[in-house]
Image (tube, grey):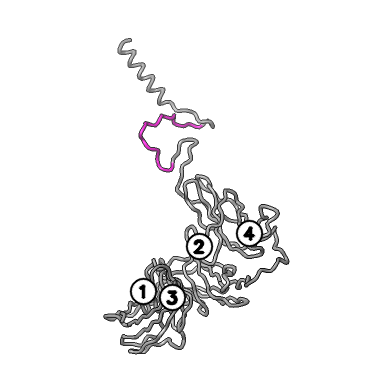
Amino acid sequence: MGAIGLTLGFLTLALFLAVPAIGPTGGTALASVPKAKGVPVAQGVAAKGVAVSTDAPPTRPGGLRPCPVPFAANPTGYASICWSASSDDTGIAGYDLYRLDPGGFVLANTTTSTVGGFSGELNHLYTMYVVARDLAGHLSPPSALITVPATLGMTPTTSPTPLPGDHVPPSKPSGLRDACLQDYPGVTFCWQPSSDNVAVTAYDVYRETATAYDKVGTVLPPSLDFAEPGLVVGQRYTYVVVAEDAADNLSVPSDPLSALAREGLPSPSPSTGPACTVTYRAMTAGPRLDAEIVVRNTGTAAVDGWTLTVDYPAAAAVRLVSGWSANWTQAGTGVAAANKPWNKVIAVGSATQVGFTAAFSGAPPSPVSFALNGKTCATG
């Protein structure tokens, strides 16, 4: 073939590659050209028939409701719920069902269906929530909380055989109100007291996170307020409160409260050196710790209203049991005491004495720091 023939051949081939292809609806579309090897597909674009993950978690399970128990005979009772399926770009791998116990929420069941439950004490109320898992291992936000009785069917047994001991839970905490302590930097809220056939011994506070409900504090009666520092100012956080009695009966959780993390009131200009001195004495017996604390005002002005925080090493796992001469609460890895009306003011040079009982694990713990109204105290 001569040079003219070769030139005409190349021109014909070039014209063929440049001819537009006709789409299925008659519109014009560019003819497809095979992609060169080693060139990555643009982010968010997939080849035909290939799913691309956006790394998004599954949607929150919704529509929680009581459901029939999965079998006819179960004399111990069974707490069973159903929910609406979550959606996800990679597919749902399963659902985790969490049950509220006195120490917090625990994993009670895992299922690939939208029905789940567990065996329990007949007619006992159980609070739970559901989290979806996708095939990429991402977790959904937790569902709303639901409380159902353990039954033999859709309704509780009307006259079960009574069990020995106290099985009556406290009433549901109510009246949650945001910003009860305006000068506190963080979240603060309060609520109305629950009632019980014997006595309410504690209020457990739970905060909703991205994938769970975390226990963030325990408040001992007669205190009815909670404060949490270290949160993002201007952001809202969702909380519920659960009342507990001495027999580990748990109330139905309160209605959720959306609380705003606030800056608090401006602090006065700091003075030089500690304005307080703490004397700490403790006795231990097994896993029990009895502590006595004397707080002395070494500043130049009277302290009118105070909160004392006592921090322990995290490994000690200190858990507050009771306290005296203050309103005691659990505060992270330590405890906190707020003044009573009769010891609200600590005059310059004077002191007040408080104490508490706690459980711990490991070796007898020693506090790592004391702070009065957020200011570190000297020890002596």
- Magenta span of residues: 27-44
Amino acid marked by disc 1 = Pro
Q: Is residue 317 above or below residue 142?
A: below
Q: Name the residue under label 1.
A: 367
* Badge 4 vs badge 3, beta-carbon distance below 8 Å: no
Q: In which quarter of the image is the C terminus?
A: bottom left
* Badge 1 vs badge 2, beta-carbon distance below 8 Å: no
Q: Name the residue under label 2.
A: 213
Quarter of the image where one finds residue 36: top left
Secondary structure, mark 1, is loop
Secondary structure, mark 3, is strand
Whichever of labels 3 and 1 marks the residue nearer the N terminus, that label is 3
Q: Mark 4 points at which residue?
A: 79
Whichever of labels 4 and 3 marks the residue nearer the N terminus, that label is 4
Observer-side mark, 4 or 3, equals 3
Q: Is residue 330 above or below residue 292?
A: above
Q: Name the residue under label 3.
A: 285
Observer-side mark, 3 or 2, equals 3
Amino acid marked by disc 2 = Tyr
Q: Quadrant of the N terminus?
A: top left
Amino acid marked by disc 3 = Ala
Q: Which residue is drawn at 36% across and 83% down?
A: 295
Q: Which residue is drawn at 70% across and 53% down?
A: 72
Between the C-alphas of marks 4 and 3, the distance is 40 Å
